Image: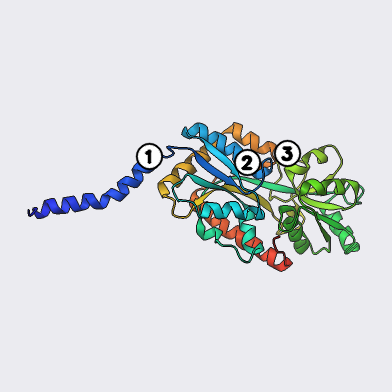
Amino acid sequence: MKLPRRNFLHLAAGAAALPAVSRIARAQAYPSRPVRILVGYAAGGPLDTSARLIAQWLSERLGQQFIIENRPGAASNIATEAVVRARPDGYTLLQASASNAWNAALYDNLSFNFIRDIAPIATVRRAGGVMEVNPSLPAKTVPEFIAYAKANPGKINLASAGPGSAPHLYGELFKAVAGVDLVTVHYRGSEPALPDLIGGQVQVMFDVVISSIAHIRAGKLRALGVTTATRLDVLPDVPPIGDFVPGYQASSWDGIGAPANTPPEIIAILNKQVNAVLADPTFKARLVDLGAEPFISSPAEFGKFIVEFTEKWGKVIRAAGIKGE
């Protein structure tokens, strides 16, 4: 049977539109079952805490469970690879972080390319660090510390939470920009480093705020500066290091990513909901208590930020000769 040309073209156009209609229908139904968010670190840490906060709010707003699944190991590379290999259907997500960008330079043989293989969805928070010293050190400001360090090259011990950790990289950036010679001492995390800093075995550390804020408030440690470009709400009397060391700025971040080729309609739904959560005063207050601030962006802005962040820290890592464990 021959169809009139007009009818044939109408049917052809309808068939061509089916994939697009199907994608939109799927997106409108999303999520129709529980969603997993993989976290590359153990439960209880800053990234896990952030993921659980955002998962709780997304569960309430979207009517499906957002379940946190911890897969620690290899500085979050294990969890990231699992998400890269997952179906791009929006039901397996990654709590991405600054570690993912750092790892691009720290590890030579990754089986994935974070920028290429993970689709950015939404940023969640940005968290600063604090430059803190043992109170016995004769330096009460960043300029005084730099002067003291230059007068005593190689005699001040800098505590690190491990190769490639935020405290390590923040310290290496400071050494490079301020032109000081500090001896880096690695620990397996901030928790074992802090007692030695308080006890005087090491003299300075660039720690994440949430780990050190209680010791600073108790007077066990002296805060000289924050690593962010502006002051932090939890440390309002502590100036940015960049006020004294031009070009110094460092912070960690986290956000949500998905396997590449995840439908843009699903990414748009998640981005809209995450940004709505970040604008909520109650949620913002929770982040401030953790020494962090809401970090709102579009997927495109998040992707651009990741590229620039990766390039900046790649230069620092390669210049210092740092390799991941």
User: 215 or 232, which lies in front?
Assistant: 215
Q: Is residue 299 above or below residue 64?
A: below
Q: CA distance from mark 3 to mark 1?
A: 40 Å
Q: CA distance from mark 2 to mark 3?
A: 17 Å
Q: Which mark is residue 234?
A: 3
Which residue type does callout 2 highlight?
Answer: Ser
**Residue 180 occupies quadrant:** bottom right
What is the secondary structure assignment of the residue under circle 2?
A: helix
Q: Which mark is residue 50?
A: 2
User: 226 or 134, which lies in front?
Assistant: 134
Q: Residue at x 73, y 54 (%)?
A: 242
Mark 1: few, some, or many residues within 10 Å (few <14, many ≥20)?
few
Which residue type does callout 3 highlight?
Answer: Val
Please state the horizontal and vertical placement of residue 260, each as a whole percent of the image: 47, 55
What is the secondary structure assignment of the residue under circle 1?
A: helix
Q: Residue at x 67, y 38 (%)?
A: 288
Instruction: Specify whether 62 is left or right of 251.
Output: left
Report which residue position mark 1 lands on: 28
Instruction: Specify whether 221 is left or right of 232.
Output: right
